[in-house]
Amino acid sequence: MDLAHSPWQAPLIWRAAQALARGTVALLARLEVTGDLPASLRDRPLILAANHISPFDPIVLTAACRQRRIAPRIMATGGLFRVPVIGAAMRAAGHIRVDRGTSAVHRALDDAAAAVAAGAVILVYPEGRISLDPGLWPERGKTGTARLALACGAPVIPVAQWGSHEVLPYQAPKGLLGGVARALLRRPTIRVHFGEPVPLADLTPGRPGVARLATDRIIDALTDTLAPLRPDEPDRPRHVDPGRPVDTSRSHRRRTAAD
């Protein structure tokens, strides 16, 4: 697929929302953003692949992207688009609806591919849900992000984040007020790092198993990008959310050269 060289222009409502997100995060936490897009990829279509650890993640990533002068179109759960006012704002901002668990889920990939072809940066959570891994490490990913990257040829940038789980609980809006109150008092540090592009150029689209191989590379890259953000929490997070269930069925085993 030929990729547009002129970047997608974010609507005013989305630029205003990014500024609001930056103020919201600054009120509740200390945001540290490291890494950046390579100069050669600036103003080109990209796929940002982020780990998912909290309902607060979209606000954090919106703020972090604003610091790096990026206005991505977010692939977000269809439920948000059904919420009055919020849904209309999401559509006006150009975000992409993902109706997981329905036959319409494939439409999201088509919409995302069209957005990339039009010059947009796409932000996606390759795990497909908030992580339920006991250590909050990236889980085994869904193949949608990899299939999108292989189909359109856009570079994939891992974006790791750590700390947003200390602001909003997993069950938000249940417990939202308590989480916000604790964050206002403690102002936890939230770290976001933009990593190096995931090497996918050697993979041939359409070959059996290539989407899973590409997906595992993306999750491996996210894991490697996340590790330096939590050096004193290598196994389990210090902050324990009693409302978060644990599920090891999708634990990710990092690929090795022998695999």
Image (cartoon, rainbow, N blue to C red):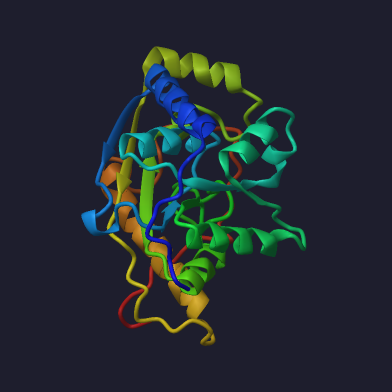
Q: Where is residue 118 in the image (x, y as percent from the top left)?
A: 49, 58
- Farthest residue, direction left: 39
Q: Can residue 240 be seen in this view?
A: no
**Which residue is at 53% across, 28% downward?**
168
Rendered residue at 37%/35% (across/down): 66
Does residue 23 lie above or below 125 as drawn? above
Identify which residue is drawn at 41% across, 20% down: 23
Whole-percent x, y for residue 188 in the image = 36, 24
Q: How many labels does the image show?
A: 0
Q: Assign the C terminus to one quadrant of the image.
A: bottom left
Q: In this view, does 147 lie to the left or right of 63?
A: right
Spot occupied by residue 235 in the image (x, y as percentages of width and height): 37, 48
Image position of 116 with respect to 73: above or below: below
Q: Which residue lies furthest to the bottom in this view?
A: 207
- For residue 255, say whether it is visible: yes
At x 33% / y 75%, what residue is drawn? 256
